[in-house]
Image (cartoon, grey):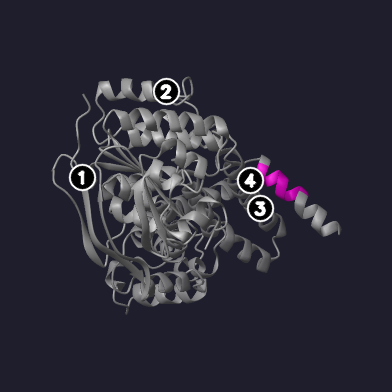
Amino acid sequence: MLKKNPNINITNLSYSINGKSLLNKISLDISGNGITVILGANGAGKTIFLKLLSGLINSDNGEIKTNSKDFSFRNSAMVFQEPIILRRSVLSNILFVIEKIQPHQKIMASELMDTLGLSGKDNQNAQTLSAGEKQRLSLARALITQPKILLLDEPTANIEPTSTIFIEKVLKRKSSSGTKIFFVTHDINQAKRLANDIIYLESGQVKEYSKGSIFFKKPTTLSAQKYISGIISDG
Amino acid sequence: MGQITNSFLEAFKLIFSFDPELIEILYLSFEITIIAVLISSFIGIPLGTVLACTRFYFRKAIISIFFALMGLPPVVVGLFVYLIFSRSGTLGWMGLLYSPTVMIIAQIILITPIICCLTFQTIESVHLKYREFFQSFHIGRLKAVNAYIIDSRFELITVILAGFGRSISEVGAIIIVGGNIDHLTRVMTTAIALETSKGNLSLAMGLGIILLLVAVFVNVAMIFIKNKFLNPSNQDL
């Protein structure tokens, strides 16, 4: 039986740089389970929203609340669009994010490498991996921390289909085991494959928040309709 | 042309016969340079790392000052150190003028800004690259700085080699504070200057060839490190 996580309540979340508003009074009540896909044209505020969720940047106003100490953004991990790989072995990269490495975590690292198609590459210089392998390594590194919330910023934007499939499979599995996932993408088909719910952003505002199935069948706003049909591809 | 050829031949004779005077000069040159580079690295690398990883008031001003200090004229540094350590100077009571110690001090003043600034540039680029990743995983500052240094280790070796190259070829400051005293403060560069002025071109040329070889070795080492370890397609860590 899947443990039901508490909802994530976002109230009046705003963020601006040099007086230019990038996110404007976002209020949402998001399910603590499943995969939430964030869609929107370039410059809509998707990455800023994700960074606010992860605590990488602080909002000007508003707050993000989860009604549980156990389920908070302190227990989150982020995967960036451009994988950041340390100049060391694949295994060392995965274990780097752990404060005190326990024997079972080494086993877990090995399992994650198997799951993500990196087995046998433990001692390989991580810099020599392909783009897709690097992104899979980033995901393995995020998952070893056993995050309650996983944030991914266009992780499959620049990688080959094999790696995309690996990553999507793992994300679905993690989601069904109780990890809340926020996933930014431009790929509508990928959003369809993954999303339990969709946040559609435009010019720093939430234009639509709905179940994935509803969003793709009957988007309520004109801009969402245009975005899905490919008329809006960037800002 | 004949004089140059003769000087070369004499120089090689001196090198391969392990001329005691030449060996003594070489030993002192390397001793002073290595000690100065080690001390400068101990000061410059942590300082450059702190400047790269922290934010505080006047940080930019301090960075600008250090960059300006990279271009310090050696003779001015020599004069400054001379004034401090001369008998009537602030530290004249220490009696260090015309000693290898004061030559090391002058070298440290010259090299530390170079090592500090090059370290700053190296570490800052890694810091900017890793910062968000470290923040998102709540990596502590100490662990982060440790990672910056470990991941820039080959660049930092080239920084130290750059400092070594600058130090071993330095003449302006050390000739003022060291006095170029035979068997005491005579190093390769000051000996070359003296022997050339005396017309003893073979010893000057011998020292010049060794200095040139050292400079070539340092540059080759830097290129080797760059190609071997800083090339992302290389398997070595």
Q: Residues within 10 Å of mark 2 (few under 14, many from 20)?
A: some
Task: State how far apart marks 2 and 3 are (Cα).
Answer: 55 Å
Between label 4 and label 2, give the one nearer the viewer.
2
* Numbered marks: total: 4
Give the number of the disc on residue B220: 4
Q: Which residues are magenta?
A: B9-15
Dots 4, 2 in contact, CB < 8 A: no
Residue B219 visible? The answer is yes
Whichever of callouts 4 and 3 sits on the residue coming sooner in the sequence is 3
Question: Please, what is the three-letter code of the amino acid marked with disc 3?
Answer: Leu
Q: Vertical placement of A158 versus B103: above or below? A: above
The residue tagged 1 is A7
Between label 3 and label 1, give the one nearer the viewer.
1
Question: Please, what is the three-letter code of the amino acid marked with disc 1?
Answer: Asn
Where disc 1 sits, the SS reads loop
The quadrant in which residue A113 appears is top left
Q: Residues within 10 Å of mark 3 (few under 14, many from 20)?
A: few
Figure quadrant of the N terminus of chain B: bottom right
